Image (cartoon, grey):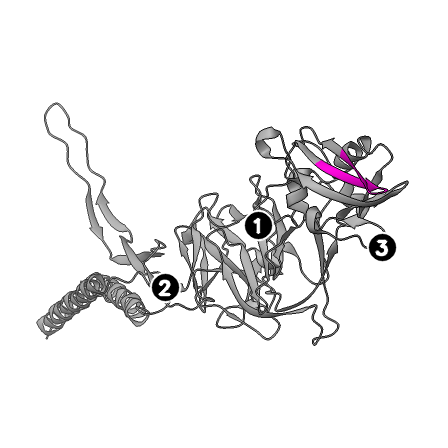
Amino acid sequence: MTQALFTSMTGLNAGTQQLTVVSDNVANMNTTAYKTSRVDFQDIWYQTKTTGTSSTRNSGGTNPYQVGVGVQCAAITKDFGASSTNTTGRAEDMAITGNGWFTVLDSDGKVLLTRDGSFSLDENGYLCTANGSKVLGMDQNVSLNRSTTPIKVPTTIKVTEGGTPAARFGQMFCSDLNGLGSTFNGITGGKFKIIANEGGVDDEIEVDLGDTSNKTINDIVAAINAAANGKYTATVIDGAISFEPQGGVTSLKFETIDEKDGGSNFVAATNLASMPMVDGAYTTKLMNVSASIGQVDDVTSELTKNYESFSVGKDGLMTVTYEDGSKLSIKSNEDGSTYFSYTDANGIIINDDIQNSGNASLYVDPNVLEKANMQMQMAKVTNDNGLVAVGNNQYEIGVNCGDVLYTAANVNGVGGVVTGALESSNVDLAQQFSNMILAQRLVQANSQVFSSANSMLETLVYLGQ
């Protein structure tokens, strides 16, 4: 009889535990990216009177005779399924469309995971959570080793532009030039004319560049000089090609040959036809522009770029826009490697070393900015239910999480990043009300059992009087 009291007490405790979990779910129904918890119950153990017997020739077998002693909470499991997103229109707000986690660094230097993307910038440009944890970035596509480099928006930078140094410019391919504008796709092969005036007499020289698809600027200049016949000398200078008249030549003119006659776009692309002689030479416009991004030393300088806004792509790569319309971005190659790309106020795109050729047009001071400062680090956990909730919508990696893959967004089974939106909680209010009623009935029923067992004991006590 007394066992019934103890058994019903386990039911009361189980119902109370379930109601506590339900109350937490309901309380967090509007919490960003909150994941619903569920209580799983199991029986405790049994008093075995007999394990049963097998059948014989003369009698049948008997089943086990056991009496259960109650219920216990086996697990509290979270539903980590992705929920719907709510549009906020705020650039700093982010949501993950699918599996995966944002990674953050708390004030104690511990790496935590979260799906709450209600971020904001602090005074130093760091992207932070509502409780001040810094959002982490990475500079590679995938790794089992987490990065602890925080996302840092370069709110103020110093940009110095100029022609690409002659040594590097000469080694660049004709198809890779950034200063020709969107109208021209590099320097095309073919011919153009140079008209050299000597003593009032024009000498028309036809220059054949040949196939330029795999030629460098040095190759182009060599082809130009091969046709010179002593009338001029072409030289590679910083970001441009200079033509200096030789002998008795007093002036040079440059003309395009029609494309149908095998002409090249060299003259049109370089503006040579409209370039005057300066200091005894004709010089193309800057065919390739280089830029250096460094530490700001004078906030009033025209070289200083001041922050206006930022955006994050689906792949977690960041673009920062400045007040003059220039942009600094992180872009990705097909192999997953990343590089810096700067678009100046004139629309010229200046890239970091995309192919690791040693001929980069953009240099970014690593003391000012790293690639990891502008690419979000995501995490993919083998067993999400192994995570340990630590509050503030954040989770610590538990011992039963399995392998954790740190990766870029929108690859390796991790969802993409959506800006201007937040993930809602996945609390199903109707389900929670159902669970609340079941918990209430569990408590009521076990209370009745307790009361009945108590009454029976009371009756037994009176029998002895």
Q: Give the Cα separation between the discs numbered 3 and 1.
A: 41 Å
Q: Which mark is residue 331?
A: 1
Q: Looking at the image, which is closer to me, 97 or 448?
A: 97
The image position of residue 169, as x and y in percent, is 76, 44
Figure quadrant of the N terminus = bottom left
Q: Earlier in the sequence, mark 3 or mark 1?
A: 3
Disc 1 or disc 2, which is closer to the eye?
1
Tell me the SS state at disc 1.
strand
Q: Which mark is residue 34?
A: 2
Q: Amino acid at mark 3?
A: Asp
- Confirm whether the magenta stretch covers residue 237: no
Tell me the SS state at disc 3.
loop
Q: Is residue 364 left or right of residue 395?
A: right
The image position of residue 307, as x and y in percent, is 59, 70
Q: Is residue 447 visible?
A: yes
Q: Pointer 3: residues within 10 angstroms few (<14), some, or many (20+)?
A: few
- Magenta residues, as a range? 193-204
Kindly indicate the quadrant of the structure image that contains residue 151.
bottom right
Q: Is residue 42 left or right of residue 58?
A: right
